[in-house]
Image (spheres, coloured by chain):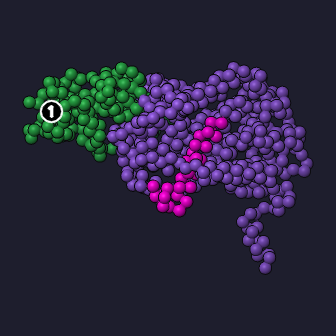
Chain colours: A purple, B green
Amino acid sequence: MMNPLRDAWQSIVRRDPLSTDKGKSELVFLNVWLHIHPAKVKKDNLKVKHTFYLGFITFFLFLILVTTGVALMFYYRPHPPQAYQDMKDLQFVVYLGSFLRNMHRWSAHGMVICVFLHMCRVFYTGSYKRPRQFNWVIGVVLFLLTLGLSFTGYLLPWDQLAYWAITVGTNIGSYAPLVGARVRELLLGGHTVGESALLRFYVLHVAVLPAVMTLLTMVHFWRVRKDGGLSRPVWKLKPEKAARLVTIGASDTIAPLTAVPASKDKTYGLMEVVTGKPIFETVSMEEEEDTVFSYPYAFFREGVALLATVATVMAVSMFWKAPLEELANPAKTPNPAKAPWYFLGLQELVSHSALLGGVVVPALAVLALILIPYVDLNPSRRPADRKWAIRAFTLFVVVNVVLIVVGTLFRGPGWAWVPPWVHITGAE
Amino acid sequence: MKRRSFFSWGTAGLVALCSAISVSLGAVVRFLTPSVFYEPPQSFKIGNPADFSFGPPTFLAEEKIFVFRDREKGFAVANAVCTHLGCTVGYFQSDQRFHCPCHGSVFNAEGVVQYGPAPRPLEWFEVTLTRDGQLKVDKDQAVPASYRLMVS
C-alpha cells in the first residue's frame, strides 16, 4: 500500500531525499518554479542588512496585486457610472470586497515605495556596475511600469479623486512637444476623460502593463542569477576580485581567470565547450566554502519575507480603508485637486511650469537614471571611492522626497501654501 | 547564389521587412484612434436670452462655460476649462476673477492670466442667435475677449 503512494510522490518530485546534498540540489534545478535560484547561495547574500529583501518584497507585493486584482475583476465593470457603483458594492455588499480592495490599494502604494527603496539600495551598494549595467536599465523600466500601473489603476474607481487626478495627469502629457496631444488622444480614446478613457485604462491596467511587467521581471531575475546572484557586500570584496570580472571581448589589460582544479567529490555536467572568457562573476574554491544550499536556508528566508509582506498588507488593510470619494463629476473640480501622492512631486513642479516641470524635468530625470551605469565608469563599489556619485544620487532622492512632501502636506485650496497644522474653514 | 544577387535580394528583403513593420505600426496607431468620438457636440444651444440674468455670469456645468450678460454690451461666453491642465475654474464675484483650484492660476474678468502657471488666457467662444431665437455656442469658434452679442 505504501509503495504505490511513494511511487506516485516520486513521479511528481523526481528527486533524491532532501536529507542528501544531491536531493537538495535536485529540488532546485529539477523544479520549474525554483530553478531561478542557484542550488547554493552565498551566505552573505542571505543577510537582511545587506539588501533588506527589498527586491523580494517588491515581487511579493506584485503577487498580492495580481491575486487581489483578479479577485476584484469579478465584480468590476469598466464603464461609467457602473464602475463607481461596483466600487460601492465592493465596499458594502461583496463579501471581503472592501478588504480585498484595501489590500490592492495599499500593496500598490507599498510597491511604489519598495521599488524606489530597492533602487536606492542598488545604487548605494554600487550594484549597477559591470556586468550589471543593463539590469539597472531594466529596473528603471520596471519602476516606470509600476508607476504606469498605479496611474491606470487610479482612474478605475471613477470617483472625483480618480477623475481629476487623471484629467490633470493626462494634460501634463499633452505638453510634450509635437506628439503630446496625439498621445493623449490615443490614451484617452477621446479629448476628455470619459467612457473610452476608462475602458482603455482598464485594458492597460489588467492586461497590457501586467504582461509587460511579468516579462521584464523574468528578465530582471534571470540576469541577477546569471550575474552570479546578488552583488556581494562591498566589505566582503577582496581587492583582486574586481579583476576577476571579465567580459567576452574585453581588452587584454584585464587579468585572465585563474584555472581552478575540479574537485573530486563533485559532479559536473558538461554542456558544451566554447572558447572565450565568461562574462559572469566566477566562484573560486575558497569562496565555495562561503555558500550554503538554497534549500532550506534561502527558501526559508524568502518564505518568511513573503509571509511578513502578506501579513503586513493584511493588517494595514484591516485598519485603513482605501479612499473612495463621490461619483466623478466633470463639472466640479475638487479644491485642491491632487494627483496620487507619488505624482505630487511632479504636480508641484507643474504648478510652476507645465512644460518644464511636467515634461522636460521628468524626462531628463528618467534619462539620467537610465544612463547612470554608462556614465559612472568608476569600477570601485566602495563608498569612499565614489563620494560624488553618492552625493548626486542623494540629492536626487532628497529633492524627490521634499517635492512629494510639499505637494502632499503643504498645498491647500488653489495650490496655496498651507502647512498641515493650519486648519482652513470653509474651503471649497 | 552569387554575391551580387545575395545582396540585392537581401536589400529587397530588408526594405520589405521595414515597410511591413512601419505599415503594421501605422495600422496599430490608426486602430487605436477612434473613428467616432462619442463626446458632446462642440456646437449647441443654451436657451433663450431671457433665461440669463444680468450681473454675475451663469455657469453651465455640462458644457463647462460661463455665460456673461451685460445690460449695455450683451452676451459673451467664456470657457471654464483652465488652459494649464484642464481643471474647471470658478468665477468669484467678490474679486471678479476666475480661480483655478488645481494649481492656483488666476484670470481677470477678460480671462487674462494674472497669476499662476496657466500659459494662455481663458478662451472665449462665439455665441450667436438662431432663427428660433435661442442662443447658440460654438466651441470650435474662438473669439477675442471683446466679442459681444447684442440682443435687443
The residue range painted magenta reads A88-117
Question: Relative to the observer, which residue lies in front, A401 or B75?
Answer: B75
What secondary structure characterizes most of the magenta part?
helix
Position of A377 relative to A133 (above/below): above
For the point 87% across and 50% down, the residue is A266
Instruction: Confirm whether residue A367 shows in the render.
Output: no
Amino acid found under the numbered disc labelled 1: Thr
Residue depicted at x 59% and y 47%: A107
Q: Residue furthest right?
A: A264
Most extreme residue toward the front is A425
Of residue A428 and residue B29, the one placed in the foreground of this image is A428
Instruction: Give the quadrant of residue B45.
Output: top left
Q: Position of residue A277 (x, y in %)?
A: 75, 34
Q: Is residue A114 magenta?
A: yes
The reply, left or right, for residue A357 in relation to residue A370 is left
Q: Residue at x 37, y 42 (%)?
A: A193
Q: Does residue A282 show up magenta in the picture?
A: no
- Indicate left or right for B60 with A175 as reference: left
Chain to which mark 1 belongs: B
- Residue A88 % position (x, y): 45, 55
Q: Which residue is mark 1?
A: B128
Residue B80, how many percent across, how many down?
A: 31, 33
Disc 1 crowd rating (10 Å Cα; few below 14, some 14-19, many 20+) is some
Q: What percent of the width, then of the height, locates residue A148?
A: 51, 40
- In this rendered view, identify the residue nearer to me: A419 or A356: A419
Quarter containing the N terminus of chain A: bottom right
| A95 displayed left or right of A272 | left
Which residue is drawn at the image coordinates 76% and 67% (left, top)?
A10
Q: Label 1: state its secondary structure.
A: strand
